[in-house]
Image: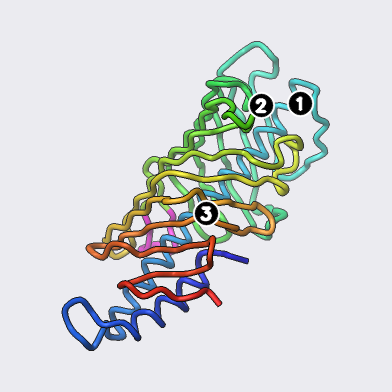
Amino acid sequence: MRNIIVPLFILLLASCQKNDSPVENNGPDEDENLFFIEILNEYSLVNQIFQDTGNITIDGIASAEGTITGKFNSTKTDPVISIEPLDLETFPKTITIDFGTGTLCEDGVTRRGIITVESTGLYSEVGSLHTVVFNNFFHDNFKVEGTQYVENFGENDDNQLVYSVVVEDGIVTVTNDIFIRFFQSTFRTWIAGSETPLNIWDDEYLIEGDQLGLSSNGVNFSTFIEEPLHLVVLPREIKSGIIDLEIGSVPNIKINYTNETFTILGKTTSFN
């Protein structure tokens, strides 16, 4: 699986140890290696959590809409999903997705707490906006905060739905005194699975856009998706695409999922 976390750690260590530093010929020392690894780990964690939270929210929206449209017959008992008002005409609607004290989801993640969505229209309706907030919500043991906005931009030339996904004031708390800040402005093109709205696990997306954040030790990081990421929801995998990262004052860190390479300080190394 081309998950971002494991290959980054291995390759970063190899690249930093074998490359010359721009200033000194001895390359980064062990402390510098650990510095980069920690921030990349935090970026990977917060990015994955907000992507996965977006997926599970879509699942809840589809289940709630099925109860009012009669198009889908959901048999879900966990999480508990409600929609108010319970009619076809009144918008905005409030959708509550309650994971209680802990729900083990199909992706192996235990979620607890509540996700609340205010929707201005049905998820498939062009122009509909879905505002997502979190109430004491946890992804495994990580507390998630912030606001996520998902807007339906309609179909592209290939008849695939495109959604804008914005995260504002995102925070993932690792422990009481360690937290990571996250901001995102991306587009998700729904390239597979839209015909089965009650099954998010067969979904695939192309993701484009930018992400920003602040690590737990106060270092800025930013990413630009140079080539769209092809994300498969389950099993979670990035099949292709290129990410450019900048950590602090170090630019041009590149992860290429298409040819499975990683580049830092001018040296390119294979994932394998």
Camera-nearest label, 1 or 3: 3
Q: Give the secondary structure at mark 1.
A: helix
Does residue 177 show up magenta in the picture?
yes
Amino acid type for the residue under numbered disc 2:
Ile
- Whether residue 170 sits left or right of residue 197 in the image: it is left
Q: Give the secondary structure at mark 2.
A: strand
Q: Residue furthest left?
A: 23
Which residue was labeled with disc 2? Answer: 83
Cα gap from disc 2 to disc 3, whole angstroms = 24 Å
- Residue 171 in the image: x percent, y percent? 40, 51
Amino acid type for the residue under numbered disc 3:
Ile
Disc 1 or 3, which lies upstream in sequence?
3
Q: Residue at x 70, y 15 (%)?
A: 87
Disc 2 or 1, which lies upstream in sequence?
1
Between 98 and 11, the one nearer to me in the picture: 11
Cα gap from disc 2 to disc 1, whole angstroms = 9 Å
- Magenta residues? 172-180
Q: Residue at x 50, y 75 (%)?
A: 270
Which residue was labeled with disc 1? Answer: 67
Q: Is 132 situated above or below 30?
A: above
Q: Are marks 2 and 3 in contact (CB under 8 Å)?
A: no
- Residue 62 in the image: x percent, y percent? 69, 33
Q: Are marks 2 and 1 in contact (CB under 8 Å)?
A: yes
- Quarter of the rendering containing residue 126: top right
Disc 2 or 3, which lies upstream in sequence?
3
Camera-nearest label, 2 or 3: 3
Q: Are marks 1 and 3 in contact (CB under 8 Å)?
A: no
* Label 3 Cα neighbours within 10 Å, binned few <14 / some 14-19 / many ≥20: some
- Residue 4 in the image: x percent, y percent? 51, 64
Which residue was labeled with disc 3? Answer: 49
Does residue 185 show up magenta in the picture?
no
- Residue 268 in the image: x percent, y percent? 41, 73
